[in-house]
Image (tube, rainbow, N blue to C red):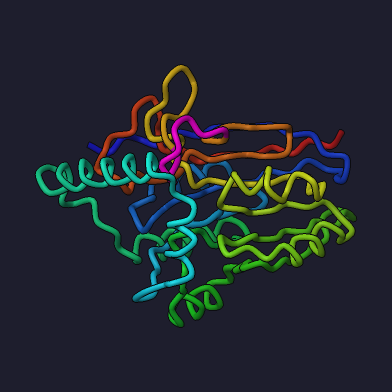
Amino acid sequence: MKQSAVTTEYTVTATGLSHPMTIALAADIHERNADDILRLIQREKPDIIAVAGDTLERYPDFDEEYERARRERYTPLRRILAVTMFTINSIIRFLFDRGNRADPENSYRFLREAAKCAPVYLSLGNHERKLLPEDIAFFKQYGITLLDNADVAFDRYGDTVCVGGLSTRYDEQWLERFARRSGYHILLCHHPEYYDDMVAETGVELTLSGHNHGGQIRIFGRGLMSSAARLFPKYSKGLYDNRLVVSAGCSNPLSLPRVNNPRELVIVKIKPN
């Protein structure tokens, strides 16, 4: 049975803004029904909506570069954990959860309706390896700003706000250029592990992530497993360093239940320091 989504709110302080700002963070829709998340957004009335990756399920027939990188990243133990979780999930889905299927219309509907509430900025995750031409056309038609290792800036009450998207196939040179831009920086980055690896040192003021689905099962406030089959990942859900916000995700693409870990819309309140 699908559990109701909740709203989780975090407050961060900012020295680069003179007026408060509210961001709705939605991550990991995975083409599942997120109408309840949409209703929460409509109620919160944010200034902007950040959609931080894995909104669509888009894969090329074979991606040699991605598969090679994945093999290098997985240790033998992580391979065992990943295969075990995949097998259990497949059995549960076959027996009890055949209705949990991806449908791109779910994501299209979410984005189309979200764009009526506030400007939508979308970055790419590991499930969006190759967008289709109809995806690009949809974004343009409904004013969705796609940020694939790219950024835009806008003026807000005299402040410059820079919004960028660091994709799974990251571009560190772009990230360095983005961090040097004048203004307050909001980075959509699906992978929270990129924060330590390359983002923290840039001084980007706020990074918005997802990817780990809250750890799927939460024990004593910690997520059990990352999306890359790491036990007790460092960043699974929450506010870290007043600079990194990690969403537990808007959907449950697995048939394994989420325990102590409801699907969530994250509201980030930025307060001038």
Question: Is residue 23 shown above or below 158?
Answer: above
Instruction: Pick the residue in front: 179 or 109.
Output: 179
* Residue that sits furthest to the left in the current view: 95
Question: Is residue 108 shown above or below 42?
Answer: below
Residue 184, percent from left and from top: 82, 51
Give the main secondary structure of the magenta stretch. loop
* Residue that sits furthest to the front in the current view: 76
What number of labels is visible?
A: 0
Query: Which residue lies at the image location 12% right of the left edge and 49% below the top edge?
Result: 94
Residue 23, percent from left and from top: 65, 46
Query: Which residue lies at the image location 46% right of the left edge and 17% below the top edge?
Result: 220
Quadrant position of the N terminus in the picture: top left
Relative to 251, 118 lies left or right: right
* Residue that sits furthest to the top in the current view: 220
Give yes or no for residue 104 being in the magenta stretch: no
Quadrant position of the C terminus in the picture: top right
Question: Is residue 218 shown above or below 131?
Answer: above
Query: Which residue lies at the image location 50% right of the left edge and 49% below the top edge?
Result: 27
Magenta region: which residues?
A: 226-234
Residue 70, percent from left and from top: 45, 57
Query: Which residue lies at the image location 54% right of the left edge and 62% below the top edge?
Result: 124
Residue 269, percent from left and from top: 69, 37
Instruction: Pick the residue in front: 50 or 118.
Output: 50
Question: Is residue 147 shown above or below 221?
Answer: below
Instruction: Pick the residue in front: 147 or 50.
Output: 147
